[in-house]
Image (cartoon, grey):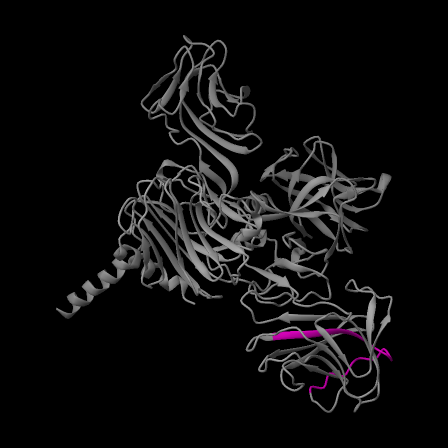
Amino acid sequence: MIITFTNVIGAIRNAISSVITTNLKMWLGFETSETLGREEVVNGDFASNTWWTVETPDAEISNGKVNFNTAKTNYGIFRANLLTTGKQYKVVFTIDSYTSGAVHLNIGGVVVNSYNSEDTFTAYITGGGSNVFGIQSDNGGATLSINNVSVKELTQITPDKSGNNNVGELFTGKALEFDGDNDTVGFSFTTPIKSAVFWLNPLDTGYENIIHFGGGFSSLKSIRSNGNIIQTAGLSSVSVYVNGVSTTSVPVNQWSRVVVNFALLTPSELKFGYAPFAYGYIQLSNVQFYNENLSLDDIAYDYANPQNLVTDRSGTSIGLSNLKGYWHLSEGAGSLTYDSSGEGNNGTINGATYEPAQPRIPQLGMMNWSKGSNLYLNSEPTSNEAAAGDITYASYSWNYIGFKNATVFGDNSLTRFRYGGSVTLGLEYTLSAFVIMDDNSEPDITNTSSSGDFGIVLGNAVTGGTNTKTNVSGNIWRVSKTKTVSLTTTNNGIIKYTTQSSKGFKVVGWQLEESSSASAYRLTDGAATSNSIVIANPTIPTQDIFGNLVRDRLNSFNLDGSGYAEVADADSLNMSSGFSTSFWVKLDEGSTTTDYDFLVCKGRGISGFDATYGFGTTYYNNQLIATIYTSAAKNQLAYSNQNATGQWVFLCVTYEPNTTNGFILYIDKLNPISMTTSGTVDESHNLNVGRDSSFVTTRQSKNIISEVLFYDRALTSDEVENNYNAGLSAHTN
């Protein structure tokens, strides 16, 4: 009896640990990404002719197939408004019962690609013209049958775990855009390499330079695109692969993965977007250099697994030691692009600009990353600074971090340069000074109040914390203290003591960083950047290349305010007859009275009343808000005091129209709040994760979102609690 009872208890626990699946129409787990989008041809087996238009004379559709025969000429089957102009698709279909003749694909009214007796055909096509997709017989007819047609957009998606094909297309990739007129990225790079791997979007068919390895005229060494073709100059033993296959053809205005293998080369100069004497009108992302050629299996793996390095492939001979350059180009801000290979070959951006929300290329939202933002970086007095003791400001022609003036500290005792900005009690900070000693010596950072050249004050005390020093270049030193603030004070700065030999020094830059926040602040080596994204160090995946902890996405959607996922509108996502949606969100970014953070929306997140606005959820002013716009009114529910930075929160909305208290908002296991609504809901919007249908970029989410569910009915309170319990173990704070 005890054993039986225990088994029953176990069965109950297992039952409540699973998500409710009745009427579940979409489930975005954001666990993985795939390179092919949703199945655009829903009835690809020709189960009926209602989805297809059959030309006259009528083609015969029966038994899940379309049949062609020589008695009928120049006919076919078509689907209007299937393709989008400029987007690339993969088409696969099967020919069986073949007797004679051939058929063509018809794309936007243009006949392309002839197929005959082979069993299965795969084609890569580009939408154009009238966006019609069709399969058409030769003039003179053909006798054969076709079944199992598949049409998928080449993009990146996260799958729909509900099986309803409501996949989320990902728009979180970042790229650098070069305008073809003086835009470059320059490097000091002289490491021997044998392959260059990159995502490329040529923006014109002209002579567009991509990578320059040095030389000029007859000695030029470079990679370029020219008239839809990848070309090289000055490289030997070259092999080119585009999208995983051996070809030099690269489409314009589309993202392609390019691999160029060549004989060992040592660059004399390295630039992106330039080669003498022309520039490149291109977008570029995720550039990798290896000192070995990639094998065919490596290339296929690299294309099929855009979130991984080729070194992750089982059986590859390429190791991390072969990775000599890795510029993800995802920083999004600043004048430097960081080398995540660990080789330290950062690049300087001249003119090129970041383009966020790119599809197709490796998606930042499915990666771990570190976000850098200097709280303070300056070398001249501002309203937040107060000078005390013997301090003067003098012109100093050094521009390491973009400032030409230096703060000069004399050799008097207890001289102080004070930062008067606010710091938060209980948080850990790192305060740094970039200094040059008057006698060009190495600074003494003895961590006491009575000795050493430097005492660094955080929280009104010199003692405590950790002092460090790093040689930046020549006689330039970075002197830092890391400490948890135990007193709230404005007395935070550098103090000079004379108990050692009396030395003056110059401070040419300051940096105050919050080093223990949920989103780790990146050390900048003195580089003047802010809000930069640096991906994880391949050799230490928990850190970026500066040693800071990365923001772990936890099998979730890791958003930085510039990306989103979009699910195409479908009948299964209708709302007027009732619906439910739920998700988990980790509030890694605080909310303010001015910034909106849109979460999951099928319409607008928050706005003035308009019957066409649909539905949305928002994090705003420490409130989690759900809004439904009906033909009668704007209906809004809000949980206040949700200042839960760094915490997972479960949010669920259920809606049963024209029912007393039929609109309900649940937060975790708190008591739900509800209201009565009336009228109809506009259902014409796509469903977005991380933004709403206003597409205002400053209101996109900066948080982590996972397990987005959508039902075409209102869940009961017991079902909502079941889903909360099902996800709790994976979302512990």
> Is 32 placed above or below 126 here?
below
Whether residue 77 is visible here, answered yes or no, is: yes
- Residue 145 shows up from this direction: no
Residue 570 forms part of the magenta stretch: no
Q: Which image quadrant: the C terminus?
A: bottom left
Whole-percent x and y of residue 275? Answer: 79, 42
Compare residues 15 and 660 and report the one nearer the observer. 660
Position of 123 relative to 402 (above/below): above
The quarter of the rendered structure image containing the N terminus is: bottom left
Q: What stretch is highlighted in magenta?
A: 429-447
Q: Is residue 597 above or below residue 493?
A: above
The count of marks equals: 0
Q: Which residue is drawn at 38% across and 57% down?
A: 651
Question: Which residue is located at x 75 percent, y 87 percent?
Answer: 452
* Nearer to us in this view, 257 or 452: 452
Judge from the rendering whether residue 681 lies leftward or rightward of residue 691; answer left or right: left
Left or right of residue 375: residue 709 = left
> Whole-percent x and y of residue 357?
58, 46
Q: In which quarter of the image is residue 547?
A: bottom right
Q: Nearer the viewer, residue 733 or 78?
A: 733
Relative to the observer, which residue lies in front, 600 or 336? 600
Q: Position of residue 84 (x, y in %)?
A: 53, 31
Q: Seen in the image, is 413 located left or right of residue 521? A: right
